[in-house]
Amino acid sequence: MADTKTGVGASVRRKEDLRFITGKGNYTDDINLKDQTYAYFLRSPHAHATIKSINTAKAKKMPGVVGIFVGEDVANDKLGGLICGWGITSKDGSGMKAGPHPVLAQGKVRYVGDHVAVVIAETKEQARTAAQAIVVSYGVLPHVVDAAKAMKSKVQVHEVASDNRVFNWSLGNEEATNAAFKNAAHVTKLDIINNRLIPNAMEPRAAIGSYDTGTESYTLYTTSQNPHVARLVISAFHGLAPEHKLRVIAPDVGGGFGSKIFIYAEEVVCVWASKHIGGRPIKWTGDRSEAFLADAHGRDHVTKAELAMDASGKITGMRVHTIAALGAYLSTFSAAVPTYLYGTLMSGQYDIPNIYVEVDAVYTNTAPVDAYRGAGRPEATYVVERLVETAARELKQDPAEFRRRSFVKSFPHQTPVIMCYDAGDYGAALDKALEMSDYKNFAKRKAESAKNGKLRGVGFSAYIEACGIAPSAAVGSLGAGVGLWESAEVRVNPIGTVEILTGSHSHGQGHETTFAQLVVEKLGVDINSVSIVHGDTDKVQMGMGTYGSRSGAVGMHAISKALDKIEAKAKRVAAAVMESSVDDVEFKNGTFTVKGTDKKMAFGEVALQAYLGHKFNSSEIEIGLKETAFHDPANFVFPAGVHICEVEVDVDTGLTKIVDYTAVDDFGNLINPMIVEGQVQGGVAQGIGQALLEGAVYDEDSGQLLTGSFMDYNMPRAANMPSIENFRLGFTCTPCPTNPMGMKGCGEAGAIAAPPAVINAITNAIGVREIAMPATPLTVWTAMQANKKAAE
Amino acid sequence: MSVVKMKINGKAVSGEVEPRTLLVEFIREHQGLTGTHVGCDTSQCGACVVHVDGKAIKSCTTLAVACEGATVTTVEGLAKGIELHPMQAAFKEHHGLQCGFCTPGMIMSAIDIVKRNGKNVSEEVIRRELSGNICRCTGYHNIVKAVQAGAANM
């Protein structure tokens, strides 16, 4: 190891922190361009309506108004609509039923919050005030907001889908699975709802679009997790400008959790409209209410799941049918989430010979649904871990031991649902979690809680996820519209400092630190000599961005490859300067040496020589020290682990408290344990949020979003989390065989693992089979009362 | 429009504002101090917390004109030159931030919590008192640790 304090494996304090703790961060809303105007979006107050007319005459005369644009303007300018970048083929071979998704509504609105018009004015207040003077005549239509009712509803959200079904997709062998159920000695069945969530990154989305009349080029500042994908889509599909005439910058971004992957109407409209107002920049900063209404939501599944076991209790089959809401329009990656990020994980950590999953994706008159932290994998894990826990209880087996017996034990393991698990040791994680949580003394703690009038329960979640998204050819064959590689460029300056340009984007993950640690490890330079450049399409050539826990396994792998090329080139320079054969040059701890001699050169000296070109033949060795690499992963990576949650439920109020939480995760080798632990803690908090607090609610009658602010949508607060002492993290390690760092992704694990652990603990505590998320005090209390009644 | 004068981070400032201008707008847009953030529109998230006359307030729910003559401290005013306030240093040391968006408000609230509850403020009190500050990244675990450590060094 080059430097144990700052290299790979060290909990280096973050390089990016200084600007954030001193108020010097540079988020999109912090940026103000000369002559800037402000945009306000008039949104639909109806869940479903035709637009009969829009009268903007009065609004156009309001003070400060620079321009007002509606759907017709967009259509006249032939600006393309928003796209879904993943095509899913139905079981019957038919294609996905994708309805039009204009950036400003054309003829119809399909959810409360749909974009109807944009007002551009000298100030934010003037834009907002003028928007109130726009007169829209709506023909209100009946709506459907409930996923379970969408296919039976007479409401038709899009003409192209008569029964509101976007696709009917399946995975696995239906016949073999049905046979397994026919021969089963025991079948466990559950009806499961995975509650709709609203991502709520703390920084609301924002955009500044500007058109330069001198260079005829556009610049878009936007809160994006993947600025290059935004540029690609806005160029190729919206047709705004070719890529070399469109620069997209995603500066500091205040959290994403998936919701900032997608290309949204507001950013496209701002950058498009700038040309139409003579090139003045247009700034839009969403407020929280808009985030609730119009950011892509997550989850929203209605599922029937069954698990078949033989007489010995061995799992022989799993059958799942899910209705997945995709909302009113297909968001950028929406179609992939309830399919290839969901069905493919149904085997969990278990050896299940027969699996069949069928998914009906449906339109509803709600905000679009797309990837939210975990994206499909939390939904799959919830199905698997609720089923397995329930089966163990029905078979009167210890849930830990039932899991252990059913685990996949040899690798590689090919599941019946595409994925091939490359490495793991699920028993080791279970053992460690049992020990850390002191499972053997649970009964004692339960008795103690009972003395205080509390019902204590324990719940397990043995999750697996596929991340490090993803092998390009594989995802291409499954319908992806892009390749999911990553790029890196390493620029070594003449004095030996290093700039890394990456297509990954950091919005909280700490790339400026972890990526630098890899450089320290490989080149032996000081960590303060390394800077990470990201988030600007004019600086970084191309990249696919950050989501799906891919920046470590894929993004850093690309950097690693480019660093290997730097080392190889530097060796040639060093060999020439030290007058030796390149085969005799060794590189270790930042120093080049010649075998069998005392000749040596520091990395910085070689860098300088590479740029001087005085001591080698520049027709044989090219001047300079700069390399690029693209990396396409060979497989997904498969983080896995066991989380154990203990809750106490108050008998009188139904209030659930997480009194103990143990997370044991196998992420392979860790680059920065401090940052990894932070990712787990944050992910678990979101999982606890889903299980206990959060849930988006649309009113059936009005189609309005009832949980439209932080006053109605219950975000996890500090007091909802387990105490410092009772929140334990542990790690096991089976290095990933497909990347040289042996690492797996860690960003989503907590959000994937936690919900079933919490719900399994509550159902264990109060002695019920099922309980809906979020398990609010009312829900839990009601379940306890029903239980009491049934017992009487 | 009326002219409002106040002291921000030790500097006397004044500006012409509308009666409806919020303190956070005055700070961010008139004074260009963009460390103070806006994360919601219902006074729940706490990204906008600043100190007015020594007390933590939410600048998104305070009118600029109501702060006439006040002494305001924002996150930019905490460090002495390049020397960090102990609470800022503690957030870095204990990894109490990820995306950094809630951080300025968290730090301003944390300092106020310590001022009111003392250096030995308990974990329970910190968690309860942070109910007006929302973080989506950290799960609060390291924030609570940072506040305790920062308190000890204040």
Image (cartoon, coloured by chain):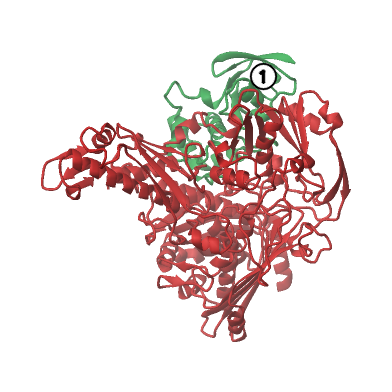
Chain colours: A red, B green
**Residue at (73, 45) in percent of width and height:** A708
* Left-right relation of A218 to A621: right
Q: Is residue A641 above or below residue A723?
A: below
Quick check: can you spot residue A456?
A: no
Q: Position of residue A615 (x, y in %)?
A: 20, 35
**Residue at (71, 58) in percent of width and height:** A98
Q: Quadrant of residue A770?
A: bottom right
* Chain ID of residue with mark 1: B
Q: Position of residue B9 (x, y in %)?
A: 54, 19
Q: Position of residue A783 (x, y in %)?
A: 70, 64
Query: In front: A651, or A553?
Result: A553
**Residue at (60, 20) in percent of width and height:** B31
* Left-right relation of A591 to A124: left
- Amino acid type at image mark 1: Cys
Q: Quadrant of residue A395?
A: bottom right
Query: In front: B99, or A269?
Result: A269
From the image, which quarter does the C terminus of chain B lie in? top left
Q: Residue furthest front?
A: A619
Quick check: can you spot residue A729?
A: yes
Query: In front: B137, or B148?
Result: B137
Q: Position of residue A323 (x, y in %)?
A: 69, 65
Q: Quick one: SS at disc 1?
A: helix
Q: Is residue A277 above or below residue A179?
A: above
Residue located beneath label 1 in the image: B67
Determine crowd level at label 1: few under 14, some 14-19, many 20+ residues with C-alpha closer than 10 A. some
* Left-right relation of A58 to A266: right
